Image (cartoon, rainbow, N blue to C red):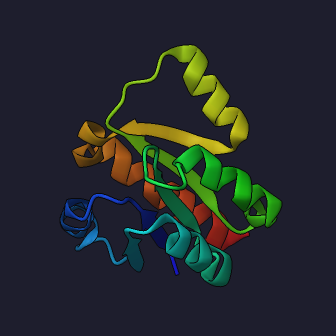
């Protein structure tokens, strides 16, 4: 598995389908954060894309759980949010283990797709 996306907004599956459909990357989208976390633990994808605000289990809480499961050796983590974070908040999130933080507006950018490819390749080479 290359990528697991966890975002409670069901429309985001359409967005990721559009972004990732021609990349050759294998991905799955989960709308329930608990199901998404279970899939991350079971499948250990090369890249995990987490939404920040989700009911029951936010993205920052999910990365802490992932750390407890020792998933960093298998997975690279990206945070996506509709919020724009200030530098201090970005540093706090990156301290938790997020390698990149993107706004949902940035998802359509070439830089986002390039970053995802690099993070997948990084773990596949390991």
User: Which residue is most to the top?
Assistant: 87
Q: Is residue 60 above or below residue 93?
A: below
Q: Identify the image quadrant of the C terminus.
A: bottom right
Residue closer to the observer: 87 or 61 = 61
Q: Is residue 103 above or below residue 24?
A: above
User: Which residue is most to the front?
Assistant: 56
Q: Residue 7: percent from the left, percent from the top? A: 38, 59
At a point 28% along the width and 67% down the height, the residue shown is: 20
Horizontal side of residue 75 vs 113, given as left or right: right
At a point 43% along the width and 51% down the height, the residue shown is: 54
Residue closer to the observer: 105 or 111 = 105
Q: Residue 119: percent from the left, percent from the top? A: 55, 57
Q: How many marks?
A: 0
Q: Residue 45: percent from the left, percent from the top? A: 58, 74
Q: Residue 10: percent from the left, percent from the top? A: 24, 65
Horizontal side of residue 5 vs 23, given as left or right: right
At a point 51% along the width and 71% down the height, the residue shown is: 36
Horizontal side of residue 72 vs 100, given as left or right: right
Q: Quadrant of residue 96?
A: top right
Q: Quadrant of residue 43?
A: bottom right
At a point 67% along the width and 76% down the height, the residue shown is: 41
């Amino acid at each position: 598995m290359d990528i697991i996306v966890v975002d409670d907004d069901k429309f985001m599956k359409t967005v990721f389908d559009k972004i990732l459909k021609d990349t050759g990357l294998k991905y799955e989208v989960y709308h329930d954060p608990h199901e998404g976390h279970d899939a991350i633990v079971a499948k250990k994808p090369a890249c995990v894309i987490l939404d920040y605000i989700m009911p029951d289990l936010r993205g920052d809480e999910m990365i802490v759980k992932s750390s407890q499961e020792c998933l960093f050796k298998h997975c690279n983590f990206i945070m996506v949010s509709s919020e724009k974070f200030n530098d201090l908040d970005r540093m706090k999130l990156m301290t938790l283990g997020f390698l990149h933080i993107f706004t949902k507006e940035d998802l359509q950018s070439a830089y986002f797709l390039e970053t995802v490819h690099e993070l997948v390749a990084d773990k596949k080479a390991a």
